[in-house]
Image: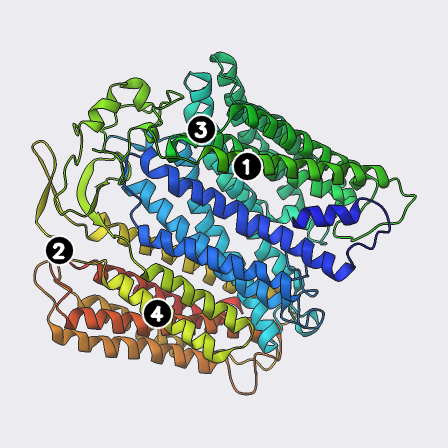
Amino acid sequence: VLALLMRAQLAAPSQTLIDAPLFQQLFTMHGTVMMFLFAVPMVEAIAVYLLPNMLGARDLPFPRLSAYSYWMYAIGGLAFYATLFWQLAPDSGWFMYPPLSGSRYSPGLNADFWLLGIGFIEISAIAGAIELITGILMTRAPGMSLGRMPVYAWAMLVVGLMIVLAFPAVIAGTALLELERAFDWPIFDATRGGDPLLWQHLFWFFGHPEVYIIFLPAAGLVSTMVPALARTSLIGRHAVTAALIAIGAVSFLLWLHHMFTAGLGGLGLSLVSIFSVAIAIPGALQIFAWIGTLWRGRLRWTTATWFLVGFLVTFVLGGLTGVMLALLPIDWQVHDTYFVVAHFHYVLIGGMVLPMFAALYHWMPLWKGRALSERAGRWVFGLVFGGFHLTFFPMHLAGMLGMPRRVHTYPAGLGLEVPNLLSSIGAVVIAAGVLLFVVDLVRSQRGPEQSHNDPWRSSTLEWLPSEAYGTRSIPHVEHHEPLWHRPELHEEVEAGAHWLPGTVTGGRETLITSPVRAHPLRVVVLAGDSLWPLLAAIGTAAFFLLMTVKQVGGTVAGGVLALVAIWAWLWQTDRAPAAEDAQAADGVLLPLGASGWQAPSFWGVVILIVVEATIFASMAFAHLHVAMRLDVCPPPGVGLAGVDALWLQTLGFALSALLMAWTGRGAWRTPVPAWRSALLLPAFALAAWAFHAGLRAAWPADRPPTLDAWTGTLAALHALQGLQIVVAALLALYYGVRIASGLVRPRQHATRESVVLLWGWICLQGVITVWWPRWVA
């Protein structure tokens, strides 16, 4: 709808249908909604739906985390979208470049809604990534080694890792910009030593990998659909998997691709230009593998097939213009023109939306056993594919004629009338195709549920007969195409001839398998339905959104609700198993419950620490960046803490971590005595003292954070550590109550391991924080 309104305004020159301020809100919201509220949530939602059955698992390991992630996205997204109706929508562009997004040029709340709203929506995406990574590595069916894992699962594993490494950078950037807007800390203010380009570094370190975070899941879906539709194995399967990994790795070297005109050094730009061209190689490898598989097989011309062919055509064209933009002379000519708009729509819509339509037509029978109409589907494809090229191909011409991005009108006589009119007509055609799809979706899914009977005779496990809680038994996998290698698997699984045919506890049970070879290790009982994730999401959303409008009471109430709900949610999850062992198969007993490195919670916390470390590294980079712009570092008048004082603070953090680890010592043998909960107070006091001592040295009274960017970025770094100290206080309180209640004991000590891991990171971050100014200087 937002895009249609913009195209209506641009259909002819000098129109006044929409004025400039409203157009900027529409433009900003369109980009933000598509990138943050559609693309990433959609690829994660498809993965959460498909992956458990595709991996042969009953469910992913943290179902309540998935629920929390969804409700965070739904509540936050609706509230963010509603800002349009109160003229509070952000209007500084979906990339929010300062100084335009700073308080001087955007004094209202519009930019704050973007900064705080997108910040917590990204938390939702990271929560989903933690769920996916842990589930893929730990809940695969026995025998499904990494070499036998579906290509789609490989794609989502790579994407999950990319999310936890890329998204924290934009969270750090939004926090820094909000600190500047709220407290006048001059982090991006060039007049006080800040640098607007710092925002671009942080934003595009997230933004360019996000393009591949959106594309790689679609590539995984294509690699799964093509063999089923061509009725033959995927050519170069291992090479395709390696290409996914290569694209994910190289994407982190390309953020300067968006800053070719920012006046950076020639050597760095040349290297990024080379990498920008080189990333086309693994992409081309996948395309040749798909084309070769289609050529070799006996192709079914279904609607999904048409969308896949449309994807290949469109994405190749988008890739070619991407190679053009990777070349510095061309990029300098068409930067910030409609040529770039055309390019990234060819890549994102061609590379994600068209495969998504194919996936919906291909996998829709899994939902209720009812396929979408093939006849209507061909009309949907024709309208969407034809309308897309009618919309975006003329934009290449408009861009080469010099039409800049983000303008709400243009004068006549520049040769832009025909390209813009064609683009506006094409947008209406796309909308007609999407509307027809929605009508067919509603029509076809009415009626009772029925068996899907595996209509495509696919090779992957999601087409096994499935009941309310997954398959009747968890299959043993002996091949990367299990249903083609063993067609009788359908009947065997339904007859309960494989793993976990019965139930030990009456709860939601699944297997934990080893990360590489998928050997069965343990049986775990997953969390059941609960309102606590919903209440936690409501509280989190209220905390961020009410903070934006400066409602202190509501902000505090939302924070308290979130903390209480998360406390209650976690309290129910670390329970003692009902028995020592569980019969996982005929003659096979496995331990019931998980702890240590075999527990999903252990690896969930490890991934969370990676996220926190990346946020911290982004803020440390911000301080380093502004320091490198100084003529004298540190600035005149800055006194650095003495080495002796720093070693004393380091000792405080180290003793705190050791004391925390010792508090739960021996929990795997005997219950931890209640008196040890008293040791958590000195453990916290040591960490708090070390933090306070470092804060006093780095933030003296005569150098407030508003003075210059050196002090402002250093204050932001210590503010992050202060937030971690608050988290440490909550951890100590929760852990202490668990110990005092006798709930840290043999076969029930996952809480101890999670708390010790997090506490150790908080102390390590504290050590780096107090030493960082001296290292930088």
Marker count (numbered):
4
Residue at 70%, 39% (x, y): give it.
428
Closer to the camera: disc 4 or disc 3?
Answer: 3
Closer to the camera: disc 4 or disc 1?
Answer: 1
Q: In the displayed image of the protein, which residue is found farthest to the front?
A: 447
Residue at 58%, 29% (x, y): give it.
311
Q: Quadrant of the C terminus?
A: bottom right
The CA distance from mark 3 to mark 1 is: 14 Å
Residue at the disc numbered 2: 747
Ranked by sequence position, the earlier of labels 3 and 1 is 3
Q: Secondary structure at mark 2?
A: loop
Q: Is residue 585 visible?
A: yes
Q: Quadrant of residue 272?
A: top right
The image's mark for residue 439 is: 1
The x, y position of residue 615, in whole percent, is: 47, 60
Q: Secondary structure at mark 1?
A: helix
